[in-house]
Amino acid sequence: MKPSVLLAALLLLPASVASASQAHPSGVISSGQPSLNQQKSTTPAGQAGARPSWQWPLSPRPPVLRGFDPPPKPWLSGHRGVDLGFAAAGTQVTSPSAGTVSFVGVVVDRPVITIDHGGGLRSSFEPVESTLAAGAPVAAGEVIGTVLPGHCPAAQCLHWGVREGEEYVNPLQFVLDLRPSILLPLPGPP
């Protein structure tokens, strides 16, 4: 490969790919989807080279109506999850990964269910009505409740948040491959 082509390829290579030991920002780049955010992810799905391993909590795959937009400081406003669109109230919500129900109840004025997936990862869904109780084991894809109206004013949506320890992370990194695309040069004459 010509040195100038190799240099150009290396300069275009994102740091997250050039060094597999570094985590990369999570987000989605495409029309109508969230853009890359500035936070690094330390979750297994967020590490360079990792593949998503969870299922979508709604079926069929829902549109993302509002993306992950964490605040720069924990006390500031932001969007600590994603809003997923759905067709009608009463739509079933499924657990994206196996875990244990850690909370079912009302937070402020909305019914919430939280699943502890282990390894410090927890998913929370609102507004979701559930008959499950804290401590109930759930399998990946198992119905955990039904969506109620009331979260998005202009459309019907389900809010899905994921926390790793005490930090909110982008839920989409668990269901989509958010690694950056890389253009490589075409092989040419030596």
Image (cartoon, rainbow, N blue to C red):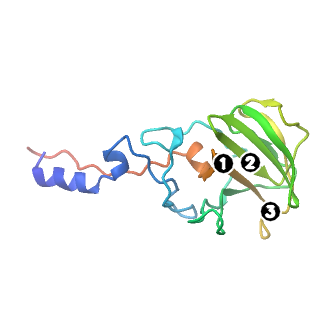
Q: Is any part of residue 175 visible from this angle?
A: no
Q: Secondary structure at mark 3?
A: loop
Of labels 3 and 2, earlier in sequence is 2
- Residue at the location (44% across, 46% down)? 23
Judging by the rendered image, the residue that carries numbered circle 2 is 124
- Residue at the location (47% across, 54% down)? 25
Say which amino acid is labelled 3. Answer: His
Q: Is residue 159 left or right of residue 43?
A: right
Q: Quadrant of residue 48?
A: top left
Q: CA distance from mark 1 to mark 3?
A: 17 Å
Residue 162 is tagged as: 1
Of labels 1 and 2, earlier in sequence is 2
Q: Are marks 3 and 2 in contact (CB under 8 Å)?
A: no
Q: CA distance from mark 1 to mark 2?
A: 6 Å
Say which amino acid is labelled 1. Answer: Val
Kindly give the residue lying farthest to the left in the view shown.
190
Residue 151 is tagged as: 3
Mark 1 burial class by Cα count in 10 Å: few <14, some 14-19, many 20+: many
Look at discs 1 and 3 and give the one toward the viewer. Answer: 1
Q: Secondary structure at mark 2?
A: strand
